[in-house]
Amino acid sequence: MTPWLRLLTAITQKVNIHGITVDEFRLAATIWEMKRSVHHTEAMSILFQNNLESSPEDDNRDAFIDSVSNLIDKGFLAWEGDDLQLAFTGEMFIIEIYQIAQSELTKRLFDPELQ
């Protein structure tokens, strides 16, 4: 198994253990990187990686509601009016995942056997 595949596998397993999808993790990580809350339409755009300025399709809306509900139930996100913000639990989880990535990348860069 290549180091990059090990890294992706470790992150995916950690995300799956917490009962969220990789796309849900990406949404939470994007909110964390922005260091702010995001309006629900912007969050939907992030989740589906496109611009949904107009009224979204019902399928997208249902998937978005399911994803956000899951992240709220897990304690990763919270509503603040029409905005979604990262909860403390979500912040700690994002930092933990980033630390896994940093550790794997550091090993890859400085271990002569992996180069």
Image (cartoon, rainbow, N blue to C red):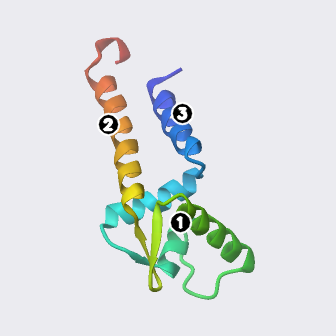
In the displayed structure image, the side of residue 16 where residue 59 appears, left or right: right
Could you say whether the residue bearing mark 2 is in a helix, strand or loop? helix
In the displayed structure image, the side of residue 61 where residue 87 appears, left or right: left
The crowd level at tag 3 (other Cα within 10 Å; few <14, some 14-19, many 20+) is: few
Could you say whether the residue bearing mark 3 is in a helix, strand or loop? helix
Residue 102 - label: 2
The residue mark sitting in front, 1 or 2, is: 1
Residue 9 - label: 3
Marks 2 and 3 in Cβ contact (< 8 Å) = no
Give me the C-alpha separation between circle 3 and circle 1.
Answer: 25 Å
The residue mark sitting in front, 3 or 1, is: 1
Position of residue 14 measured from the top left corner of the image (x, y, whole percent): 51, 39
Give me the C-alpha separation between circle 2 and circle 3.
Answer: 14 Å
Q: Amino acid at mark 1?
A: Ile
In the displayed structure image, the side of residue 63 where residue 18 appears, left or right: left
Q: Amino acid at mark 2?
A: Gln
Q: Residue sitting at 39 percent across and 65 percent down? A: 31
Position of residue 20 measured from the top left corner of the image (x, y, whole percent): 58, 52
**Quarter where residue 80 is shown:** bottom left
Q: Residue sitting at 37 percent across and 37 percent down? A: 101
Residue underneath mark 1? 72
Position of residue 23 measured from the top left corner of the image (x, y, whole percent): 56, 56
Q: Amino acid at mark 3?
A: Thr
Give me the C-alpha separation between circle 1 and circle 2.
Answer: 27 Å
Q: Residue sitting at 30 percent across and 67 percent down? A: 35
**Quarter where residue 88 is shown:** bottom left
From this view, report whether residue 56 is shown above or below residue 64.
Answer: below
Looking at marks 3 and 1 on the same chain, the residue that comes earlier in the sequence is marked by: 3
